[in-house]
Each structure stands twice: as C-alpha cells, then as structure tokens.
Image: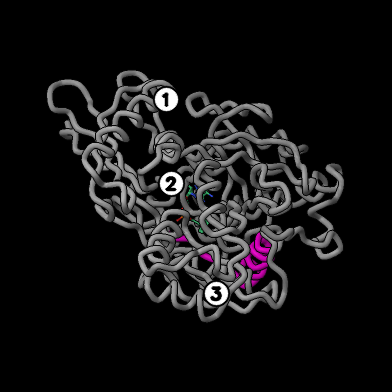
Amino acid sequence: MKDLTPNRKDLNPIEIASRDEIAAVQLDRMKWSLHHAYENVPHYKANFDAAGVHPGDLNDLTDLAKFPFTVKQDLRDNYPFGMFAVPREKLRRIHASSGTTGQPTVVGYSENDLRVWGEVVARSLRASGLRPGDILHNAYGYGLFTGGLGVHLGADALGLATVPVSGGMTERQVRLIRDFKPKGMTVTPSYALSILDEFRSEGLDPRDCSLEVGIFGAEPWTNAMRREIEDAFDMHAVDIYGLSEVMGPGVANECVETKDGLHIWEDHFYPEVIHPETGEVLPDGEPGELVFTSLSKEAFPIIRYRTRDLTRLLPGTARSMRRMEKVTGRSDDMIILRGVNVFPTQIEEQLITVAGLAPHFQIELSRPDRLDVMTVLTEAMEGHSANEERVHAAAELQGKIKRNVGVSVKVQIADPGGIARSQGKAVRIVDNRPKD
Ligand code: DLL
C-alpha cells in the first residue's frame, strides 16, 4: 500500500492547533449555539426552562452537562420542521432518515451549514489520503440519505473529480472502477464486500485495480474487516463517521497514517460520552454513549444529542482533535442473550477468522421455547461448499463465539451468495421472536 499521509501544510490549521486554542473556539461557539437554539427553537426554550438552565449559565465547557439531552423522539415530535432555527427562506437543503419505524427524522441546512459540511468532509477525505485532482468513486446512496450528497459536497470542496455513482448496480460499479481508475472509493463496508464479490465472480483480481483507499462508514465495522478489505484490494481502509442529526458523514474520520480511531472535528461538533443509564458524563477513556452538541450549525442546531452509538474518547494523535474509538455498535443493536450483551461486530470479528466462510452474515433471533436462540446465518466461500467443510467451519465458528464472546449460538452456512447483499447499510439483525 502506498504512503498517503497528507502534507501538514495542507491541513486546516485548527486540526493541529493547541488544545487551548481548540477549547477557546469551542467555548465561544458553544455559547453562541446554546443561545441560538434557545432563542429560535421552542423545543429548546421549553426544555431548558423546565430544567432551570439558561444559555447564560455556561461559563466553561463542562457546564454543558447542566443542559438537558435531546433524543430522537424529540425530533419525531417536532416533525417535520419544528426543530429548525432559521426561517424557511434561509434553508438550502433538507435531508431525512427513513427510519425503520414511525416518523422519519428531518434535518435542514443553511448556506453556511453546507459550507461547513463541505469543509469537514473535505478534511475527512484529505485525512484519508486524497488530494485535489484525485478521482473519487462515491458509492454512498444519493438522495435523502446524507451519505452520497454529503461526501459529494466535501469532494467538491477538496477539489476531487467525483464519480457520483450512488449505490446499486454492482456490475456497473466494477466496470466504472476499472475504466475510470479512481484513487478513492466511498461506500458502506458491507456494500464494499458486494463489490469485492463482483470482482471475483468476473474472474478479476481486485488487487490489480487503481484504488488506493476506501473510506467506509454509515455502519459499524471491525478492525478484522479492515484487514480483510485492505488485503483483498491492496488499499488502505479508513473509517468515516457521522449522523444526519449532527450533520451527516464527516463528523469524525480516521487518519490514513495512523488508523487508530476517528478524529472528531471538534471545532464544529462537541463530543461527550455518557453512562447510557444514568446520563452522567464520563471521563475520556471510558466507554459509553456518544453525545454531540453542534457548535456552528444555523438551520438545525442540536444540543446534547444522544446518538446511541457506543465508543470512548481518546486523546489526539495525528491531529490535536480528540479521537473516538471505532464504534462497537448502537445500544439499539445490542442483543442481550441469556444475560450476555452481544453486538453484531463481535460476531463479525470471529467470522472473519474462520477459513472457508464469506464475511457476509445476519443474526437471527428466535424463541422456539421460552429461551431466546441466536442463529448466525453466513455462507460458504466459493470453492468451500462441500458438506464436510461446512460442518467443520460451523463448529469452528460456534466454538470461537462461545470462547471469545461468551454465548452459545447456532450457525447455519448457506451456499455462496445465500445471504442477502446490502447496497447501503446492511441489516444485521432479523428478530423473529414473538412480540409481546
Ligand atoms: O450514516 C452518515 C454517514 C454516511 C456516515 C456515510 C458515514 C458515511 P445516518 O443515516 O443518520 O447517517 O446514520 C447514522 O449510522 O448514529 C451510527 O449508528 C451509524 N454510523 C455512521 N457512521 C458509522 C461508523 C449516516 N463509521 C448512524 N461506524 C450513526 C459505525 C456508524 N457506525
């Protein structure tokens, strides 16, 4: 793999500013953001008043802990535009998350918000090793989802030539990669695996393609998967994080030279990690739920938003901004199986180490008697589907999950191609337990 470390002189100076400088910018902006939300969004005024706090009570960054949290339900209750802080004519973009159930959540951007979004995504793409003039194959979905258009904004801001291919039509993805020879690819890790399969099924070696870096996010993925993808494509694989409620992609990104967690662009998004049950703010280094406060957003300020994503905060390395560890999962996706907490990422980690099994999987939950049963559905790799080999691989995976994750599961191995492929975010959990 090539050394893609960006030139330090090309970074935005704030990325490598002193901690004092960063904190000073954060405090100024946080004061502004709290006032802006309080004065322009009835929900924040009502919530701050009910909690007995006023934006004027913030004297230092830790005072933020006095302010109430915002949760997804608040956005749903204010559907569609109730959380917006600018008049309609100042809006330049509206995105929405489909949401699996109920109301979608709607977010809005002013002209300046779009500029900031472009800047943070440009930083992310540069941290990933891309430079002006490079070609980017952008396979995140274009549309209401923030992935495609968000990455596109940042690619424009950085000066890349973007191929706005969006998700789907996997054969065409492979063809365009071969013909246009992009240096970078932005895509969900699960869809990257579908693209990888397509290369192989056409008898092509993905290591021969032009890609030097893949920038993967929008769903959890593991370091084990990183090694798998890096090896398959002979390219770097870095992690990009974000969520619509806070901005979209580009809230945090790994640096290609270190790949040691994602630097949060803290001059625009202030992170806290809290205890998921008590709501108490935890010191850096301790795992918990990530919470974000926007520091510069005009159209849709967000104060102490509970992301449900589990991670911990770490000091800066390649940049002075703090890092978040790779997200292990969402608290919503945590399966409690006979008292043991299990995340799909833990299953992924084990699966990847078993020879003969493809990295595609789903977890099915059922309750045949009164006990919950977890079945890992995965598939044999091409050329490894003989019955004996499958039985052996299933036993090996079962044993590894038992030893390393601590739960007994069933394993079912389908034929190659037997697990539904994702074209965006993968659906990892299929819950067939009776609803009571
Ligand atoms: O997924 C934004 C995005 C697009 C990020 C493209 C990165 C790349 P939402 O659809 O609102 O926005 O979903 C946000 O996806 O709360 C996490 O649970 C999950 N997620 C996003 N990035 C990562 C990541 C976009 N790198 C939700 N690792 C978040 C783990 C991630 N989970």
Residue toward you, 269 or 397: 397
Per the image, is 112 magenta?
A: yes
Q: Which mark is residue 405?
A: 1
Labels in figure, total: 3
Question: Pointer 2: what residue?
Answer: 72
The circle drawn on residue 416 is none
Q: Which residues are magenta?
A: 106-125
The secondary structure type at the circle numbered 1 is: loop
Residue named by callout 3: 92
Pinpoint residue 5: horizontal percent, then vertical percent. Answer: 76, 58
Most common secondary structure along the magenta stretch: helix
| Residue in the foreground of this view, choosing between 241 and 135 | 135
The Cα atoms of the two marked residues, 2 and 1, are separated by 30 Å
- Asked if ligand 1 lies within 8 A of label 1, the reply is no
Q: Which residue is farthest left?
A: 369
- Closer to the chain start, of discs 2 and 1, is 2
